[in-house]
Amino acid sequence: MANKLDPGFIEHIHDVLVTAFMPYDEKINPSEFRNRGLIESAAGRPFQTAFGAELWPTLPQKAAVLFHSLVCNHCFINGNKRTAVIGVDMFAAINRHLFIMPSHEVYEMARTTAQANQDGVKPDDLIVLLDSKLSQSLLDIEFFKREGMKDRLGEHYETVMKRIVMIEEVAAGAVEFGMAEASPIQT
């Protein structure tokens, strides 16, 4: 089962989390126009089916489709790429995964996605590329709980474990408070 981001939570990501964690020089105005239909489309697209089978059955594929939709749908006047970055991080968290990618690679992934969309690259081709990147960047939190990880992570162990505790709380709270809903998934 995968947890699906609620469209209202995506709006919260845009209005509150982007402003708090990625303000940059382009401010987010929570009262600005947003297209609720496109937000709902972005939230639902990773869970589409055809002939009884999921179009994107794995977590990295779902994350890639969510990222692509949030960047390219232009749900908001400003902050679509930043919303996509935090949205994928939250999507990973509610599905008990860490999104680990260097900041410059995340920036490049967002910029490249927007540019490819503008250049007319087919969405499916772009999703294959995003899936490849995200397959390497979404790590199941159980991986970090294995014996010997404290020695392997060294000084980073405590930071990672604190993030895991936060992720477990986010995942439980998101479903409990309706920010996410459960859906079947292959891992």
Image: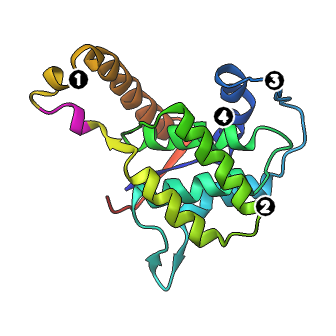
Q: Is residue 156 above or below residue 182?
A: above
Residue type marked 1: Leu
Q: Is mark 4 on a helix, strand or loop?
A: helix
Sequence-first disc among 1 and 4? 4
Along the line of sight, the residue nearer the viewer: 28 or 54: 28
Mark toward the viewer: 4 or 2: 2
Report, in whole angstroms, how far the alpha carbon at label 1 lies from the one at label 2.
40 Å
**Extent of the magenta region:** 142-146
- Which quadrant: the N terminus? bottom left
| Residue 156 position within the rendered picture, expressed as x and y whole percent measured from the top left | 30, 18
For mark 1, does the 10 Å Cα neighbourhood hold few (<14), some (14 to 19), or many (20 or more) residues?
few
Sequence-first disc among 4 and 2? 4
Mark toward the viewer: 4 or 3: 3
The residue sitting at 40% across, 24% down in the picture is 166
Q: Is mark 2 on a helix, strand or loop?
A: helix
Residue denoted by label 2? 118
Report, in whole angstroms, how far the alpha carbon at label 4 lies from the one at label 3.
18 Å
The residue sitting at 38% across, 23% down in the picture is 163
Query: To which quarter of the image does residue 99 belong?
Result: top left
Q: Do the residues labelled 4 and 3 touch (CB within 8 Å)?
A: no
Q: Residue 153 carries which label?
A: 1
Residue denoted by label 3? 25
Residue denoted by label 4? 13
Residue type marked 4: Ile
Q: Is residue 71 left or right of residue 104?
A: right
Residue 145 magenta-highlighted? yes
Q: Is residue 39 visible?
A: yes
Residue type marked 2: Gln
| Residue 182 position within the rendered picture, expressed as x and y whole percent measured from the top left | 45, 52
